[in-house]
Image (cartoon, rainbow, N blue to C red):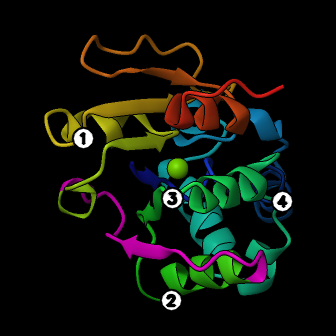
């Protein structure tokens, strides 16, 4: 199976670093698990501009990105999928230097994956052609892929768990063991 994965929020947990940055830059404490534009800006905790500044600062700094933990078991199950013959690639909104940082992050964890950096607020449609499965923590990134990728999953976090997914999105996923089960057809014990 050809598998595509988002980077921020699916492979890597950016939330704690962003929370700390918001506190340092703007004196606002936002719980890490709530750190998503729709929530943070929607509740008036930061302006859209401030959110963008926090997000770009986090993703444009190699050391800051390397300080973010991978999601639990993401490295393990990515390796397992590769070992079992699946193709795995990263499709991220990061581009340019920020995409290069994401690539360094994967290499740091021993993962040699193809990475497509499509650019912020640009649909991932072209980069996702040929995939059988794609997971993203941003529902807006999944919608344009309907009809392009057969199996589309929203990676669920507290900041997006309130969202009702449209019927043409396959489902939600909550963990890497679940992602692995969905792709391999095997239950993880
Ligand atoms: Mg993401």
Query: Circle 2 is placed at which residue position?
Result: 97
C-alpha span from label 4 to label 1: 28 Å
- Give how far across and how far down residue 76 sits, in percent: 78, 55
Reply above or below: 101 against 88.
below
The reply to whether callout 4 and callout 3 are in contact (CB within 8 Å) is no
C-alpha span from label 2 to label 4: 20 Å
C-alpha span from label 4 to label 3: 26 Å
Q: Residues within 10 Å of mark 1 (few under 14, many from 20)?
A: many
- Quadrant for residue 18, please give it: bottom right
Q: Of all residues shown, which one is farthest toward the left? A: 147
Q: Residues within 10 Å of mark 2 (few under 14, many from 20)?
A: some
Q: Is mark 1 on a helix, strand or loop?
A: loop
- Quadrant for residue 149, please give it: top left
Query: Circle 1 is placed at which residue position?
Result: 149
In the shown orientation, is residue 105 left or right of residue 129? right
The circle on residue 173 is: none
Q: Which residue is drawn at 41% across and 63% down?
A: 93
- Quadrant for residue 66, please give it: bottom right
The circle on residue 85 is: 3
Q: Residue at x 55, y 36 (%)?
A: 184
Q: Is mark 3 on a helix, strand or loop?
A: loop
- Give how far across and how far down residue 177 sits, in percent: 72, 34
| Among the two numbered marks 4 and 1 on one chain, the one whose residue lies closer to the N terminus | 4
Q: Magenta span covers which residues?
A: 108-125
Query: Circle 4 is placed at which residue position?
Result: 69
The reply to whether callout 1 and callout 3 are in contact (CB within 8 Å) is no
């Amino acid at each position: 199976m050809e598998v595509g994965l988002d980077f921020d929020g699916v492979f890597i947990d950016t939330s704690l670093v962003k929370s700390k940055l918001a506190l340092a830059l703007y004196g606002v404490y936002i719980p890490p698990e709530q750190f998503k534009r729709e929530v943070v800006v929607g509740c008036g905790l930061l302006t859209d501009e401030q959110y963008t500044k926090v997000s770009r600062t986090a993703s444009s700094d190699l050391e800051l990105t390397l300080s973010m933990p991978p999601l639990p078991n993401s490295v393990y199950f990515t390796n397992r999928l590769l070992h079992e013959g699946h193709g795995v690639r990263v499709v991220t909104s990061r581009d340019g230097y920020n995409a290069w940082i994401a690539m360094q992050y994967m290499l740091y964890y021993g993962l040699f994956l193809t990475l497509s950096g499509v650019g912020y607020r640009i649909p991932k449609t072209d980069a996702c052609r040929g995939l059988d499965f794609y997971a993203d923590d941003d529902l807006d990134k999944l919608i344009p892929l309907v009809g392009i990728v057969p199996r589309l999953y929203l990676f669920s976090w507290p900041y997006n768990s309130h969202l009702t997914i449209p019927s043409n999105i396959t489902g939600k996923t909550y963990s890497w063991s679940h992602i692995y089960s969905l792709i391999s057809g095997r239950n993880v014990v």
